[in-house]
Image (cartoon, helix red, strand yellow):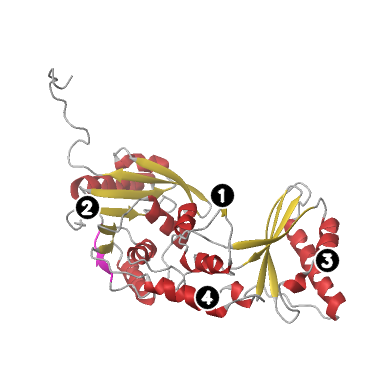
Amino acid sequence: MLAEELQALNARNIEIIKRAVVCDYDAELLYRCNVELRTCLKVLVPVYEFMSESTDDLYNFASRLKWEDYFDVKQSFAIDFTIQSEYFKHSQFAALRLKDAICDHFRKLYDERPSVNTEAPDVLFNLHIHRDKVTISLDSSGTSLHQRGNRMAQNIAPINEVLAAGLVLLSKWDRQSHFVDAMCGSGTILMEAASYAINKAPNLERSYFCFKNWKNYDAALYRKVCKAAEARITEFDYKIIGTDSSKKSIFIAEKNIQKAGLSDWIELREISIQKMIPPMGRGTLIINPPYGERMQIEELDRLYKQIGDAFKQHFTGYTCGVITSNFEAAKNIGLKPTRKFPVMNGKLDCLFYIYDIYEGSKRKPKTESTDHDA
């Protein structure tokens, strides 16, 4: 889904790799990726790659690199790291050695070292080590891009915004029909669907990006990117409805939706999925039901059966999506999924089941063949 989003931004030389997508970039695309991509957590710019088999080797090589090209000694920095290597068994120590190399490099140049700020650094580096290959990147985003800045409160086990956006895109909702989340919780899926429906860039109103602290930051170009994104916001003529049987969930969702500025496009109702009657015609439903951590098996099986019954009784003409890590409970929905996608919800392996709800059988009835048919 991320590769498709990049294609829509006219990125070049797109390549899907493990848990990431790479492409060529310029400053405008970098800013657009941070502002407009829905299924992206971080936008990284590799600046150094080298081979290393020890923390001493890492320190010696990194201390000679030209860190002053990327930030000033008066700025703060921090290092994120992902390390999978038999040579670097203590990941945090490798990141610490890189930090020492950067600080010692500045001390040699200016007799002064930059400060480390792990909460809100001016410049954030990403250290990635796979076996003996070291890649150091500038993190242009800073905090994860799933933090849209519109969640005031959250319910139990809220879904990540990037995952929610991914589910909306995986469902192939065309934005020319209704959208429903009948177990809406704190409203995350609804907000991602609504911003997608009106083509509002997910991070258009976010103020903090690390690239704003880079030496080559172009404020005029960034304003141009934001203005162009704002101009692409459009109307939406169908309904987006969120329901939940919990009064508390509806209250939380309402507050979050208001803060996101999406109240004009989302209706909320306190009602269970069993009693919810969606708008007539075509539509898409996506729900994130309980997976069973706090429910008895019999209670969970009953809930998933009720979900399947609701689909069959009330959602004819809809494409219905269900994400869950409880594959046994999902069997109680009692419908054969049209498609299913493996996804991660936090650390949980999940499946996103898609059900196309037809009236009667999907297959056409057989007719007697004639010479003409033959």
Mark 1 to mark 2: distance in Å?
35 Å
Q: Earlier in the sequence, mark 4 or mark 3?
A: 3
Where is the C terminus found, in terms of image quarters?
top left
Give the secondary structure at mark 1. Answer: strand
174 within the magenta span: no
Above or below 203: residue 325: above
Q: Is residue 78 above or below residue 50?
A: below
Q: Label 1, on which residue?
A: 15
Front residue (pair 213, 363): 213
What residue is drawn where x is 31% and y is 55%?
A: 174
The residue indicated by pointer 2 is 282
Q: Tell me the magenta residue range.
A: 265-272
Give me the C-alpha separation between circle 4 and circle 2: 39 Å
Q: Is 341 or 374 nearer to us in this picture?
A: 374
Crowd around label 4: few <14 · some 14–19 · many ≥20 (10 Å): some
Q: Are marks 4 and 2 in contact (CB under 8 Å)?
A: no
Q: Earlier in the sequence, mark 4 or mark 2?
A: 4
Contact? badges 1 and 3 (CB < 8 Å):
no
Q: Earlier in the sequence, mark 4 or mark 1?
A: 1
**Residue 327's image quarter?**
top left
- Tag 4 secondary structure: helix
Q: Give the left or right position of residue 354, taking residue 23 as reference.
A: left
The residue where tag 4 is placed is 222
**Numbered mark located on residue 63 in the image:** 3
The type of residue carrying mark 2 is: Arg
Examine the image and state in which quarter residue 125 appears: bottom right
- Within the magenta stretch, is there residue 269? yes
**Disc nearest the viewer among 4 and 2:** 4
Q: Position of residue 19 (x, y in %)?
A: 57, 51
Q: Are marks 2 and 3 in contact (CB under 8 Å)?
A: no
